[in-house]
Image (spheres, grey):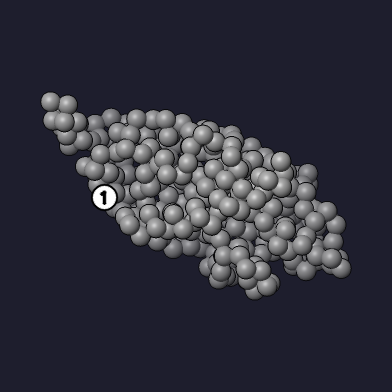
Amino acid sequence: MATVSSTVMAADFPDDDITFISPASPGGGSDYLIRSLQEGLEKDLGVNIIPQYLTGGGGAIGFMKAMQARPNGYTVVAIDNKVFTQQGMGNVNFKYEDFDYLASFYSVPYVLAVNSKLGIDSVEDILPGGEHNRRLKIGFAGIGSSTHIMSVLVGKELGANFDTISYQGAPDATAAVMGGHIDGVVMDPMDLRSALESGQMKPLVVTSGERSDSLPDVPTMKELGHDIDISNWRGVAAPKGMDEQTRERWLSALEKASQDPTFVKRIEQLGIQVNFRSGEEFDQYVDDLAQELIPVAQEVASENS
């Protein structure tokens, strides 16, 4: 009887509002993904998509809330590299395998960017012998976040003198740069789009293997002689244990939303292309990233313990 009941429930999915958790502050990359998907998902699923902002812990609070929800399809979370780095730092009681990864939509490199008023024109300026070779205050979005790990990794690889400083979220770190309280950040460029477009912040280097379409004039770490090829992806996950019928309903809705003209336009406004991934290919991508980023985060944790 229980099996019949659960099958009926899955067949009726969804018949109530859906909570879409952002594990980061409003105005950042996770929020942008949710807002961009919202119209297409509501159109296809026929229910309201309710964003819920659970900030703190570099994404840990939002991820833990999502993991603890019932796996019935009514709670999903915007997910990215933070899920791996939090595990590697040992800050959380979950593993990345505790989530059902539904789909990803695009990926972007991390970018080292500084306040334009500093007059720093290139990475060479901040290296030994450079015009601005001093200890730079570099912000990131939360202890254990992927921006935390990448800020340490970028500084270490470049041989630059970084004092890394944690902020509640990307908007707070960006505001600190704008206010002259810190020198720069290592961040997902989506979180910096206004500051970069206005010229208030100067991008110095990106972490992808090839130059970013959104920042075509900015060199990569590889071009500077460093073996780093790490980008941040944006996707949607659910607590582990969702039944197959509900999962398929979600996958169908997410794929349609990724093709919605409103979504495509919003992503292209960032200078990037939609690249929808799901299924076995996406699962392998997640596993490969986990194997790459978790050890890096563990190393950072051990060096700072």
- Total count of labels: 1
Q: Residue at x 87, y 68 (%)?
A: 129
Give whichever of 184, 8 is nearer the camera: 8
Residue that mark 1 sits on: 252
Residue 269: tell me if it is visible: no
As helix, strand or loop, the secondary structure at mark 1 comes to helix
Q: Quadrant of the N terminus?
A: top left
Residue 107: tell me if it is visible: yes
Q: Amino acid at mark 1?
A: Ser
Say if 165 sits above or below 69 in the image. Answer: below
Q: Residue at x 72, y 57 (%)?
A: 155
Say if 224 sits above or below 42 in the image. Answer: below
Q: Residue at x 68, y 73 (%)?
A: 225
Say if 106 sits above or below 247 in the image. Answer: below
Give whichever of 270, 60 is nearer the camera: 60
**Residue 134, horizontal then vertical, whole percent:** 85, 57
Q: Quadrant of the C terminus?
A: top right
**Residue 5, horizontal then vertical, whole percent:** 16, 28
**Residue 230, horizontal then vertical, whole percent:** 56, 61
Asked if residue 242 lies left or right of residue 288, the reply is left
Give whichever of 187, 244 is nearer the camera: 244
Q: Residue at x 17, y 34 (%)?
A: 7
Say if 243 sits above or below 267 in the image. Answer: above
**Residue 241, horizontal then vertical, whole percent:** 32, 37
Disc 1 crowd, CA 10 A, few/some/many (<14, 14-19, 20+): some
Asked if residue 114 lies left or right of residue 212, the reply is right
Quarter of the image for residue 69 reads: top left
Q: Residue furthest top?
A: 1
